[in-house]
Amino acid sequence: MRKALVLFTTAALVAGSALAGPALARDRMDRSELSANQITDQYAARTARIKADLRLTPEQAKNWPGFESAMNDLAKASADRQMAMQTTGTQPKGPVDIIEQMRRQAKYMSERSVERKTIADAAEPLYASLDDQQKRRFAAELMNLSRPDAD
């Protein structure tokens, strides 16, 4: 009986993951069709939600504008990147050039690295002023920014 339960659970997980793949691809395709304004609006809403969740004191709020500005810059960069992907298309045209693909990935990673450092530098004064509970919430939000699909 136990073996049957394990086999059934495994089969359900495999089937679920097979169905989830196409759904995630559709989600990413839908997201790539957003306009630049929609992308920046999403970042603005996220930034506003972070601020509301933190419930900053007046003293802490003095450190907010630097972080908010960095988030706005990140939103613009993300929107620009999405618009460039839409105009160039994501379908390969001919055989895959692995060297060119590696260069594009390196460029993407380099740009993301600079963006992450900028966010970290801007968040540091705010983070230092937060209490322990606020730090946990803020850290969770910052970790969500690092997800590849958060872009």
Image (cartoon, rainbow, N blue to C red):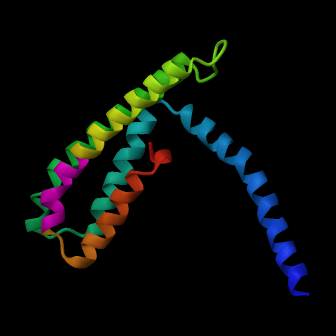
Is 69 a magenta residue? no
Q: Residue at x 80, y 69 (%)?
A: 10
Q: Position of residue 42 (x, y in %)?
A: 42, 45
Horizontal side, residue 8 vs residue 138: left or right: right
Q: Position of residue 115 (x, y in %)?
A: 29, 40
- Which residue occupies the extreme bottom position in the image? 1
Horizontal side, residue 14 vs residue 132: left or right: right
Q: Position of residue 9 (x, y in %)?
A: 81, 73
Q: Of residues 79 and 114, which is closer to you in this image?
A: 114
Q: Of residues 56 and 25, which is closer to you in this image?
A: 25
Q: Residue at x 66, y 41 (%)?
A: 25
In the rendered image of this protein, does residue 73 appear above or below residue 138? above
Q: Position of residue 62 (x, y in %)?
A: 9, 58
- Magenta stretch, residue numbers: 119-128
Q: Main secondary structure of the magenta part?
A: helix
Q: Of residues 73 and 139, which is closer to you in this image?
A: 139
